[in-house]
Amino acid sequence: MTTESAPAPHTAPVATTRRVPSVHPPRGTAGRRPAAHAKRRIRQRRRPVALIAADATAAVAACALAPGVPWPVAPAALVLTAAGIALHSGRGLYRLRLSPSALAELPALLMLSAATWLLLDAAFTVHDPAYAVGPAAVATGAGLQAALACAGRAAVHQARRRAAARRPRSALVVGRGPSAQQLTAALYAHPGYGMRPVGRVDPGHRGGPADEGQLPVLVTPEDVSRAVIQNAVRHALFTGPDLPAHLVRLFGGHGCRVWQVAHPAAEGTAPPGRRDADHLWGFAVRQLETDPPRGGFPPAKRVLDAALAAVALVAAAPVLAVCALAVRISDGPGVLFRQERIGLGGRPFVLLKFRTLRPADEHESATRWSVARDRRMSATGSLLRRTSLDELPQLWNVLRGDMSLVGPRPERPYFVAKFAHTYPGYAERHRMPVGITGLAQVNGLRGDTSIEERARFDNHYIDTWTLWQDVCIMARTAASLFRLGGS
């Protein structure tokens, strides 16, 4: 374990006055891999029960106290409560925030309360015109509910800040330089955020003299995992513009909340007026999603894949027949090329392509990286590769469920093992089904290009997956076919 000697900023000289917790490896584990229990997730999801209770209490009280409202209190309060909670959830009013403000939430509370009261008035009026109330009564009831909800939320926020200050959770600061130092000092000086730094993560740290009072510096993923487990770390705060994907997933795998922190003046921070803007003592901050889509194939993705693959196979049947005939005439028997590739979750499957080159043996097929310039390739094979028509049989793999239309490109087992050992984050590509095309390919990373950059694009695609993103990538792939690229 190494420590860094940079002093804490003068704005909060607590870093030299507090006793910093140490992070030690467990006995007998030096030089060995972390134990199996290192992957145990830390369950620490904070549920918004108190905020929901405050909103429900406000709805019931407003329904009972609002003047000039002839509605039955019980059903009206039930509807107001259920509708209010649903709307507040959709508006993000139950999202975990580091600096919540009841006054900042008041406009949203007022708008949503007015919507629920108007809908409830319309429903009662349709049921019985005797229940109709005027706009003044609706406005009074909505305003009363919003005011009561604001007051209740203020009490909840204050109680949470006090509880967080009494029992702060362990946190790791990721990054280096003034921002990391200032953030650490701010967390020490303001315990109401509920975070107590126990270490700093700096994969590029080269060591240095240790000064008293400095946080331990964690360099390797093994150090980070050990520190998370031993110190029950609940939060990870990234202070730099770069977000190493393997660290984000590591913290997410342990159940930590992951935050991106930036100076308010930094480019790319949340613009004014954004409802999800949050801050940590003046540092713009946003929570990162760390959970990949569940179940391997998101249902909407699988439906889109199956539908489009079926249509494409039917539409491309004449092209498939022409390609197969050309390969048979040019290269002889064996039109289809079958090769083992690694798919979702590291599971192997047999990938189909039109044969463009007949390898010398199975070893060459499994271990040779590129055959793009091989002189044994016929003119037909070269044309199929340049136009990517050799990939068309993979539509059958998509229909079978082996692949997706969009995803990381599948690779052979030999290269998967090699690249996973060499490039951090490469193995994480298999969290999503492999695809015929992907974000890396539409950005020009195909054929003999950087594996590290491909893995970076693939993991970014998985972390930010949406159905619309798949549609955009397919559109860009279709446009690129006219440029005769290929691998």
Image (cartoon, rainbow, N blue to C red):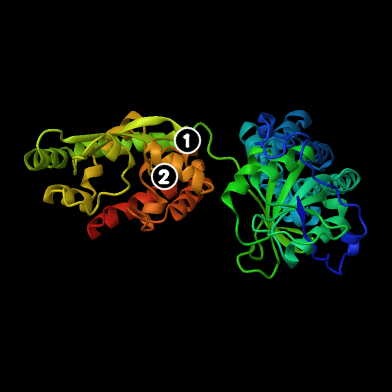
- Nearest the viewer among 221 and 95 is 221
Residue visible at 45% across and 43% down in the picture:
418
Tag 2 secondary structure: loop
Label 1: which residue? 298
- Residue 361 position, x and y percent, is 24, 36
- Nearest the viewer among 69 and 282 is 282
Residue 138 in sight: no
On screen, residue 44 versus residue 327, left or right, reads: right
Label 2: which residue? 408
- Residue 395 position, x and y percent, is 28, 37
On screen, residue 44 versus residue 312, left or right, reads: right
Q: Select label 2 or label 1 by which is in front.
A: 2
Q: Which mark is residue 203?
A: none
Question: Given the image, on which type of amino acid does mark 2 rest?
Answer: Pro
* First of labels 2, 1 by sequence position: 1
User: How many residues crowd around disc 1 within 10 Å: few (fewer than 14), some, or many (20 or more)?
Assistant: some
Residue visible at 72% across and 66% down in the picture:
177
* Number of disc labels: 2
On screen, residue 350 versus residue 173, left or right, reads: left
- Nearest the viewer among 134 and 283 is 283
Tag 1 secondary structure: loop
Separation of marks 2 and 1 at Cα, in angstroms: 15 Å
On screen, residue 390 versus residue 241, left or right, reads: left
* Residue lying farthest to the left in this orientation: 329
